[in-house]
Image: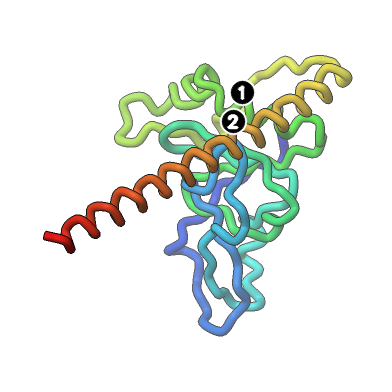
Amino acid sequence: MAEPIFSGRSVSRIKSAPGGVPVRLLAPRDVGFVLADLEALESMEVDHAASDLASVRIAAGDVVVTSRGPARAAVAREEHAGAIATANLVVLRVGEPSLRHVIAAYLRAPSTARRLQARSIGTATIGFGTQDIKDLEIDLPGSGDLAALDELVSLTDRYVAAAQNGITARMEFAQQLVTRSLDLGGARR
């Protein structure tokens, strides 16, 4: 499906270096229909020469999928280039741009998630790894259909993410109003 495919690294295995180079950490909670904006990601300072992190750095266009819990997958934007993939993420470096959003949508489909997680039934944590993704067999449509499908999925992902952000903002605003109202009511008693 894609090469290379790699797993993220546990934050506890990333050596911090106060005063070093700041890097952004992409965690499973940052993966939805789109990846969280760069400024929303946690950051950490690492040694300037941390060459061991090259193997877990995200590039623009990478497909990032959560490997534990409900499958979520999204395509990394230019702003995510250089961020570090953390544990419970699998990253696919897809060379063909018209495949990226289609593969992300395919990986988060419930039927695909069930296929990927089937091997871990009976284990303490349901999930999958890089080999499970490599073993997936998929039948791709023609290139013209693929480009149109990729554009449709990309637009839909952005629309869903914007709608979710709007719902979250409205919910937070309502919560603030309720809290402020109840706090004021308590002050009057």
Q: Would residue 4 be seen by someone viewing this image from the given angle? A: no
Q: Residue 20: x, y in percent?
A: 59, 80
The residue at the far front in this view is 188
Front-most of residues 128 and 85: 85
Residue in front for this viewpoint, 80 or 128: 80
Q: Is residue 14 left or right of residue 147?
A: left
Alpha-carbon neighbours of circle 1 within 10 Å: few (<14), some, or many (≥20)?
A: few
Q: Which label belongs to residue 85?
A: none
Tell me the residue at 54%/51% (across/down): 8
Q: In which quarter of the view is residue 94 placed?
A: top right
State the mark number for residue 133: 2
Position of 59 with respect to 85 (left or right) is right
The x and y percentages for residue 77 are 71, 48
- The residue at 50%/66% (across/down) is 14
Q: Secondary structure at mark 1?
A: loop
- Give the residue type at disc 2: Ile
Residue 64, x across and y down, in percent:
61, 42
- Contact between marks 2 and 1 (CB within 8 A): the answer is yes
Residue located farthest toward the left when viewing the structure as drawn: 189
Quadrant containing the C terminus is: bottom left
Q: Is residue 168 visible?
A: yes
Q: CA distance from mark 2 to mark 1?
A: 5 Å
